[in-house]
Image (spheres, helix red, strand yellow):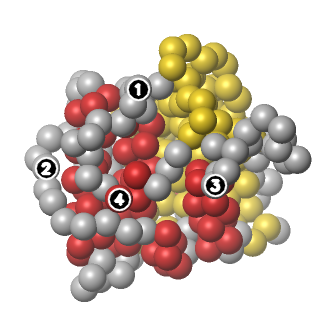
Amino acid sequence: MRSPARLRIAASLLVVVTAAACSDSTGPGQQTAAQVAAHFDSIAIRANAQSDTNSAYGVRSFLSTLIELPAALGAVPSTVSVTTANGVEQWKAYELLDVFPPGSSNTDSSFILLAFRDADAHTAIAVFFDSTGTAQDGGIITGDTISVNPSQGAGSTSLTSTSTTCATPSGSLHNPQLGTIAVSQCNLAKFRTSLSLTSPTTPGMDAALTTVTFTNATVNGVRAVDQASGATIRRVKAMLRSASNMTSH
């Protein structure tokens, strides 16, 4: 994300969302990765059902699916100290490193940061980074359905370590979007990430979110290699990038 940059998550993200209805009352807190995955599985499915009457919930379903993915693979969310316009808050965060399969003509990797303010991710941030770890585009969703397009932003990330092989997602997860994502290799990972966003005052948005920053945070997540045929993570992220319509200045 070149600074300053204009970041967008467009309503057309809806084209990559599919799911059916269910609910769950548990939240991330100090829970296991499996419990976090089950929680966001329910949120994603419920939001998609709500999108039948309010299309803005499709974005919430998609973001919840992205949060669900590293949890389903065994990663526990990190707690990140985020400085907002009102002071320091404790958010949860995940990061995903997506790698092309061996032998691919394209060797670039890409990262996605997912940070959420509360247990149900009523406010969440998604930011995409290129293969060098430089943030390129992203945005804030708040109040479940309000898209906030930052006016300025900068960020960087790097993979600091990998560890054990990822878990196999539980058969009790019912979000169909999760089932479309397949990887050939996956390891739990840690990242070092910094982010700074400045956003305009937006109706329905907490004014504290006009500035959101953190520096050198350790973020848990996964390093995933796409399958040689299909590259499903890559396709979904490419669709999202196309829909986000970022404009740089």
Marks 1/3: CA–CA distance: 21 Å
Q: Is mark 1 on a helix, strand or loop?
A: loop
What secondary structure is marked by label 4? helix
Image point 32% across, 29% down: which residue?
33
Point out the image quarter for the C terminus. bottom right
Residue 172 is drawn in which quadrant? Answer: top left
Residue behind mark 3: 230
Residue 130: percent from the left, percent from the top? 76, 47
Closer to the eye: label 1 or 3: 3
The residue nearer to you, when weighing 181 against 94, is 181
* Mark 1 vs mark 4, CA separation in Å: 18 Å
**Residue placed under numbered mark 4 in the picture:** 176
Q: Distance between the residues labelled 2 and 4?
A: 16 Å
As drawn, 149 above or below 79: below
Residue kind at label 2, given as amino acid type: Asp
The reply to whether residue 151 is in sight is no
Mark linked to residue 167: 1
Q: Do the residues labelled 2 and 4 touch (CB within 8 Å)?
A: no
Q: Give residue 171's position: percent from left, percent from top.
A: 27, 40
